[in-house]
């Protein structure tokens, strides 16, 4: 990704945030949804921020979701991973997208450019391989941009500063790490976003994943990154595990072999757009490993990456039938609409992994309510602690404890 495109994406993101802010004040349904979520977050000790500051975080997340969604579609279009053209933006594709959009408007009266962008997202949602990218937790379905903002977004890709080719014979997705780190300045400050250098990722996997395989065996190795960011550790671990499965059983069905490796890699992150990037990167890596050329004919990959706060002890028990309600700290708690409350209890069950790796955020917990909550949950949170402190304790909770043979899980993190 060129620096010029990254700057253009950052600039247009502010346009989307401004539009969503107006929508949050002008659209009663969105205004009421945000107020309700804020009230539940306050009651559930998820935040102590003023409404306006809390809302700004959510609107930024939603704007990034809209921008990233179009990046995913553009990457798929340019690399012919899907058969249709919805957005376009390089030679010939913009015209094809406009023609398809015009035909859509003829078939469906009263639709807007926003509906057309959502059609692109819905196409990826109905494919088995990419369904989780645009599931019900994706903010695009609950935080709608205006029709005018959608016109501007399409124009950005087709004729504006976003005109760019994502075509890549290697289907390399590491550029998404740049987006993770630099697209939203608001999120970068809030989460202390910083992608892990490749040599550091490889070094830590050498010291953790490799000895885990030697100690427990390939089939019994399982890795988690509870602060996975854009998925560098997850993708690196997947490639290593898949290569070993291919070496062990070269005649196996490639789809079965790929899914074995995917089942051994788990990631969680509190940042929903980090999770979206990690899921997309693992999906493309799995597609390549299967030898598939199209997402439309690819299998329904099970990607074990979820959105949520890894430091909270999520439980399987539900307080009520409401899909957004889970049990945290042994009591009813409300999950954010972006969080995978149904998956977190499983993914974060203590003692199930042979490897825990990651690059946790090294920032202080500024929200006093969350600060105090982590103090109650983690004995290591004393004095003015950095967020990395409870994460270190959490890493050791997630890996296997020492067994009768003297074996224990391997932990590797950047300090």
Image (cartoon, rainbow, N blue to C red):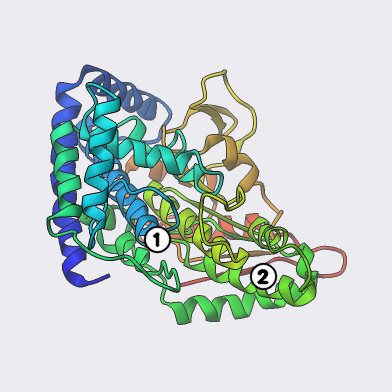
Mark carried by residue 273: none
Residue 348 visible in rendering = no
At 50% from the left edge and 43% from the top edge, which residue is drawn? 132
Please name whichever residue, 42 or 149, is drawn nearer the observer in this view of the structure: 149
Question: Is residue 3 depicted above or below 141 in this figure?
Answer: below
Mark 2 packing: few (<14 Cα in 10 Å), some, or many (20+)? many
Mark carried by residue 241: 2
Mark 1 packing: few (<14 Cα in 10 Å), some, or many (20+)? some
Q: Quarter holding the N terminus?
A: bottom left
Check if mark 1's residue and mark 2's residue have beta carbons within 8 Å.
no
Question: Is residue 18 depicted above or below 155 in this figure?
Answer: above
The alpha-carbon separation of the residues under discs 1 and 2 comes to: 26 Å
Q: Quarter holding the C terminus?
A: bottom left
Question: Is residue 181 left or right of 338 when viewed as pictured?
Answer: left
Question: Is residue 336 depicted above or below 332 in this figure?
Answer: below
Instruction: Return the x and y of residue 362 as percentages of the image width and height.
Output: 38, 63
Q: Secondary structure at mark 1?
A: loop
Mark 2 or mark 1, which is nearer the start of the sequence?
2
Mark carried by residue 361: 1
Instruction: Return the x and y of residue 17 as percentages of the image width and height.
Output: 18, 42
Question: Is residue 31 depicted above or below 282 in this figure?
Answer: above
Q: Secondary structure at mark 2?
A: helix
At 22% from the left edge and 63% from the top edge, which residue is drawn? 91
Which quadrant of the view contains residue 212? bottom right
Please name whichever residue, 72 or 205, is drawn nearer the observer in this view of the structure: 72
Instruction: Return the x and y of residue 139 as percentages of the image width and height.
Output: 35, 37
Q: How many marks?
A: 2
Instruction: Return the x and y of residue 321 as percentages of the image width and height.
Output: 57, 18
Q: Nearer the viewer, mark 1 or mark 2?
A: 2
Question: Is residue 367 left or right of 322 when viewed as pictured?
Answer: left
């Amino acid at each position: 990704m060129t620096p010029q495109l990254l700057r253009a994406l950052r600039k247009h993101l502010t346009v989307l945030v401004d539009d969503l802010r107006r929508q949050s004040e002008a659209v009663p349904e969105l205004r009421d949804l945000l107020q309700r979520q804020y009230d539940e977050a306050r009651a559930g000790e998820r935040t102590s921020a003023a409404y306006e500051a809390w809302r700004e975080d959510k609107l930024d997340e939603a704007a990034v979701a809209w921008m990233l969604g179009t990046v995913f579609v553009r990457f798929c279009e340019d690399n012919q991973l899907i058969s249709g053209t919805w957005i376009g933006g390089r030679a010939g594709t913009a015209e094809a997208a406009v023609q398809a959009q015009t035909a859509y408007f003829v078939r469906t009266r009263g639709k807007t450019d926003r509906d057309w962008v959502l059609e692109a997202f819905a196409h990826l949602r109905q494919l088995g391989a990419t369904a989780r990218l645009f599931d019900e937790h994706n903010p695009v379905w609950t935080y709608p941009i205006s029709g005018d903002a959608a016109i501007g977004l399409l124009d950005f890709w087709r004729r504006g500063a976003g005109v760019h080719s994502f075509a890549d014979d290697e289907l390399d997705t590491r550029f998404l790490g740049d987006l993770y780190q630099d697209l939203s300045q608001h999120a970068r400050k809030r989460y202390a976003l910083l992608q892990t250098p490749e040599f550091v990722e490889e070094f830590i996997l050498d010291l953790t994943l490799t000895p885990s395989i030697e100690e427990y065996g390939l089939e019994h190795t399982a890795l988690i990154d509870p602060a996975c960011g854009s998925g560098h550790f997850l993708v690196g671990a997947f490639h290593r595990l898949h290569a070993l499965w291919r070496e062990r059983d070269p005649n196996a069905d490639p789809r079965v072999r790929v899914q074995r490796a995917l089942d051994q890699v788990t990631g969680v992150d509190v940042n929903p757009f980090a999770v979206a990037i990690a899921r997309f990167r693992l999906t493309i890596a799995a597609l390549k490993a299967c030898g598939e050329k199209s997402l439309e004919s690819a299998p329904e990959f099970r990607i074990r990456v979820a959105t949520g706060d890894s430091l909270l002890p999520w439980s399987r028990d539900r307080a009520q039938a409401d899909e957004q309600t889970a049990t945290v700290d042994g009591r009813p708690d409300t999950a954010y609409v972006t969080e995978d409350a149904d998956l977190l209890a499983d993914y974060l069950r203590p003692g199930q992994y042979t490897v825990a790796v990651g690059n946790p955020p090294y920032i202080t917990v500024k929200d006093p309510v969350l600060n105090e909550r982590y103090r109650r949950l983690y004995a290591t949170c004393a004095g003015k602690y950095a967020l990395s402190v409870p994460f270190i304790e959490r890493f050791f909770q997630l890996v296997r404890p020492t067994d009768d043979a003297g074996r224990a899980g391997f932990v590797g993190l950047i300090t």
